[in-house]
Image: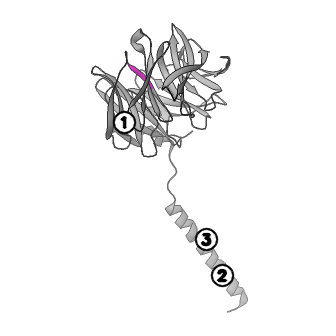
Amino acid sequence: MSIRKLVLAAVVSVVFAAAAIALVAVVVQPASPKPTDNQYPVAKVNAPVGTSSGTTPTSTGMVFVASSTAAGNFLTELSSRDGKITDKMQLEGTGATTSIAVSGRQVCVGFDGNDHGGLISCFDTRTRLHTTTWVAPGAVLDANGRNDGVSFDLLVNEGGQKFAVTVRLAKTTNTFAISRHTKLPVSAISLVALANGSTFYSLGNDGTISSVDATSGKVRFTLQASQGASRLAISNDETHLYALIHGETSSRVDVIAVVSGKVTSSLKATPDVNWILPTIDNARLVEFAGTQSSGSIEQYRLFN
């Protein structure tokens, strides 16, 4: 065989080999997610009746859920994967549960106080034993846990004025003390905080999202969510906000870019959803829903 034929044969072999590799690559690679994929839950389990709020699922899928029913207020630990309940504790407190947050080994539930002053009730996440109850200066509307393991940022209604109240737990006495008291727009109904504690984002009942300096209380800038927005959450990289929108016939979650203020995508939400937050890897949005006759946890794929 001539050198020319040998070269030609080698080239043909390389081409066919490359084509085969490309074909295998196409076959083994998973299909790219479609934009419509985030309109359907990838996981759904039953939750306690009257579920008002819940925590971020752990690496094993466990969550704490706060709920209020005619029988009382409860803190329940269960799996977000199969709905199996691990523990259930009755909460002491007036009014209904409004929020829940974790800092270190403390999981604390906020109460609206039924117009008689709010409070937070805390448990140890490992022993499930009650650790402390702290009387807030007003109804607790929202709660965020800090990464330091001992601090919480609470949205509190004090006589019609709204404040972000930062409280710190003294480990020796298991009691809370206020470390910062930041005034918020009077319309505030939901609150999230940056991890470094420098900034609060408050959602107003008119859909306005305010970026507030945590020290001075000065509003740096505002973003606009849709009318009907009732709950705010933030992505783990702090680049996007999630606004829960309740409409007349349906509910959804708008994903809002902090830099541009634009809605980058929207996710379907169950009509009775009360609480939203992203998973640790920011791949899913978890929705906690509940009425006096039902409760559920649904997870949707996130495409920012």
Please tell me whether mark 2 sits on a helix, a strand or a loop.
helix
* Residue with the mark numbered 3: 18
Q: Quadrant of residue 17?
A: bottom right
Q: Return the residue nearer the eye: 4 or 178.
A: 178
Q: Amino acid at mark 3?
A: Ala
Q: Which percent across, then down, holds residue 170?
A: 53, 26
Q: Which percent across, then down, holds residue 58?
A: 45, 42
C-beta proximity under 8 Å, tags 2 and 1: no
**In magenta stretch: residue 292:** no
Image quadrant for the C terminus? Answer: top right
Q: Amino acid at mark 2?
A: Ala
Name the residue at the front extreme.
172
What stretch of residues is rendered in magenta? 92-99
Residue 10 tag number: 2
Q: Quadrant of residue 9?
A: bottom right
Residue at left offset 50%, top offset 45%: 34
